[in-house]
Image (cartoon, rainbow, N blue to C red):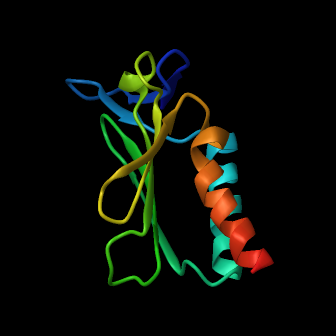
Amino acid sequence: MKRTDASNVAEFPGQKNSIQQVCFERKEIDRILNLYGRMVAAGHWRDYAIDMGKDVAIFAAFRRAAERPQMRIEKRPADRNRQGMWSLHGEHGQILKRGHDLAGVLAPMERRLLKAVEG
């Protein structure tokens, strides 16, 4: 596997057409799983799924495994020069936040966690 720094895309050579896949970096997945662990401890989430495709990498958190995801974090390197490659999606698919920085995109979920602890 070969990583290209400019696009955060992993290339898998050896096939006729090289397969490319968008993936989370170690720091990014650590930050996301840190938030996930705190949300589990607060009783909001119980399950998660990670999908890494050709154009997008997705982390989805579920309240229950049989439901649609309560929250999705998407990484789309193709949108880096537009509104940012990170986006936070709500349960019904609405875009809650977009940005160039993962911490800024996760801020609404962090605030929700703080409200749950205080109240």
Task: Relative to 4, say whether 116 is above or below.
Answer: below
Q: Where is residue 117 in the image (x, y as percent from the top left)?
A: 77, 77
Q: Outermost residue, front direction? A: 119
**Camera-nearest residue between 91 and 32:** 91
Residue at (32, 43) in percent of width and height: 53
**Camera-nearest residue between 15 and 78:** 78
Q: Where is residue 38 in the image (x, y as percent from the top left)?
A: 71, 70
Q: Where is residue 116 in the image (x, y as percent from the top left)?
A: 69, 76
Task: Relative to 63, say whether 23 is above or below.
Answer: above
117 left or right, relative to 18:
right
Q: Outermost residue, left direction? A: 16
**Camera-nearest residue between 54 and 70:** 70
8 left or right, relative to 113:
left
Task: Relative to 21, say whether 17 is above or below.
Answer: above
96 left or right, relative to 117:
left
Residue at (37, 35) in percent of width and height: 21
Residue at (39, 82) in percent of width and height: 65
Task: Relative to 119, say whether 102 is above or below.
Answer: above
- The quadrant of the rendering that contains the C terminus is bottom right
Q: Where is residue 77 in the image (x, y as percent from the top left)?
A: 42, 27
**Camera-nearest residue between 16 and 29:** 29
Name the image quarter holding residue 82: top left
In the rendered picture of this protein, how many numbered marks are placed on residues? Answer: 0
6 left or right, relative to 108:
left
